[in-house]
Amino acid sequence: MIDPVRARGHFPSLSRSQDGRPVLYFDNPAGTQVPQEMMDGFIHYLTNSSANVGGEFATSQETDRLIGEARAATADFLGADSPSEIVFGQNMTSLTFHFSHALARTLRPGDEIVTTRLEHDANVSPWLALVEQGIVVRWIDIHREDGTLDLETAEAAITGRTKLVAAGYASNVLGTINDVRCLGQMAHAAGALFFVDAVHYAPHGPIDVQEIECDLLVCSSYKFFGPHLGILYGRYEVLGSLPAYHVRPAGDEPPDKWETGTQSHESLAALVGTIGYLEGLSEDVGGGRRERLRCSMRNIKNYERTLSEHLIAGMRAIGGITIYGITTPEWLDRRVPTVSFLLKGVSPHDAAKSLGEQGIFSWAGNHYAIEPLRRLGIDATQRIGLVHYNTVEEIDRFLVALERIARA
Ligand SMILES: Cc1ncc(COP(=O)(O)O)c(C=O)c1O
């Protein structure tokens, strides 16, 4: 299990207070707070080693080594075979548009891409952008009552014409964890590539790209305690064979052919710091970095289940609250503690404002999850999302504040 008190000690921003009380960071799905190790990496790089790559002098060589280390650390975090399968970019959205346009150069009119109604729009719009060139986008639907994927519709949508199946690992609006392994097997049985949006899942549990049999996976380090930086994992043969848009000096080999221009080296240094922090949560575990990261993320997942239980039970007890997504206690390990809800008679924006005034940070809006909300017949929800530095005591304070708003 994670010791949240020990973990919190690594995050300086958690000591912020408002009107004499600690702030509650329940806005994590839009970006988490960062540990000291992340900031140390950032500052150390800019203080000591800032340079461009490929030079015959110390700071440039240190930068080359740093980029190699960032790829190796990320490969361990994701369970990739090789650091060459890790591509960095500005954020997940840019990397996914870049990828979809490269893939499109291999497609013909009538070829199909399958995505789901549970996605953040960054795993929808890059595929819809290809419709104008004759690509057909098909959909896997959701069960509206609990926000899980309807796998019968997946069987109908994935056919011999499917070239790529794109699915989220976890929903940023309903918290559902998808059975990505099963979807990967369905995609491969149809001869299609399998693309996973792991942005929302990454802070909540271990990712192993081999185990889930994905060809491509994207995530964003600012969602898992790191800097604003996007990550694309791709199987080496897939990254090698697709025609990425790149400048000629970048060469034709992954990962360089997928990276456009100069990277944010200081962010890569910060990412190494973040991964070091996560590894350190299991410092007593033997084996290498990969094993320790796996253990830390498993422990985070177990701890967060207790948060989900406490939070959802407490919210259900208040009454007058519609909670979207899985709420059945026995099924809580199929969700992360990201909870969308509506208070009867209170607009989500007003409720978020009232909580914000009390130092409890949450979101109201569509969360860029246009498709899921449309399927649920609503325009907006209020959303809170917890991570491993949140605590049961914080949930209790939130529940008291929420009940007060519900009763007002
Ligand atoms: C599930 C999911 N996918 C994709 C994105 C887009 O990520 P980025 O901001 O790195 O482009 C987000 C951002 O909120 C997200 O939650």
Image (cartoon, rainbow, N blue to C red):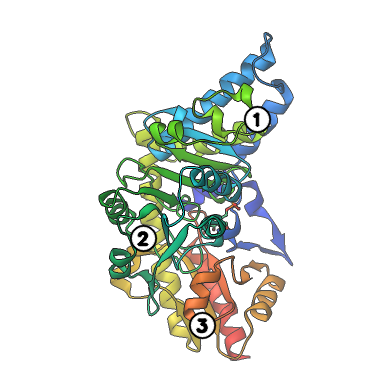
- Seen at 52% across and 64% down, the residue is 385
Q: How many labels sit on residues?
A: 3
Q: Residues within 10 Å of mark 3 (few under 14, many from 20)?
A: few
Residue 182 % position (x, y):
28, 56
- Residue 350: x and y in percent read 68, 80
Q: Ligand 1 closer than 8 Å to the CB at disc 2?
A: no
Relative image position of residue 66 (x, y in whole percent): 58, 24
Name the spot of residue 105 as percent of width and height, x first.
51, 43
Q: Which residue type does callout 1 highlight?
A: His
Placement of 309 over or under 198, stated as above or below: below
Disc 1 under 8 Å from ligand 1? The reply is: no
> Is 362 rendered above or below residue 11?
below
The answer, for residue 281, to whether it is visible in the render is: yes
Q: Which residue is mark 1?
A: 265
Q: Which type of secondary structure does the marked residue at label 3 adopt?
A: loop
Left or right side of 81 for 57: right
Q: Residue at x 32, y 73 (%)?
A: 329
* Residue at 28% in and 69% down: 152
Q: Residue 178 bears which disc, if any?
A: 2
The CA distance from mark 2 to mark 1 is 33 Å
Which residue bears the numbered disc 3?
377
Q: In the displayed image of the protein, which residue is found farthest to the top?
A: 56
Q: Earlier in the sequence, mark 1 or mark 3?
A: 1
Q: Amino acid at mark 2?
A: Asn
Where residue 366 sits, quadrant-wise, is bottom right
Whether 81 is drawn above or below 365: the answer is: above
Asked whether 266 or 329 is in front, the reply is 266
Determine the CA span between mark 1 and mark 3: 43 Å
Q: Quadrant where the C terminus lies?
A: bottom right
Residue at position x 40%, y 28% in the image: 82
Q: Which quadrant of the structure image shows residue 168?
A: bottom left
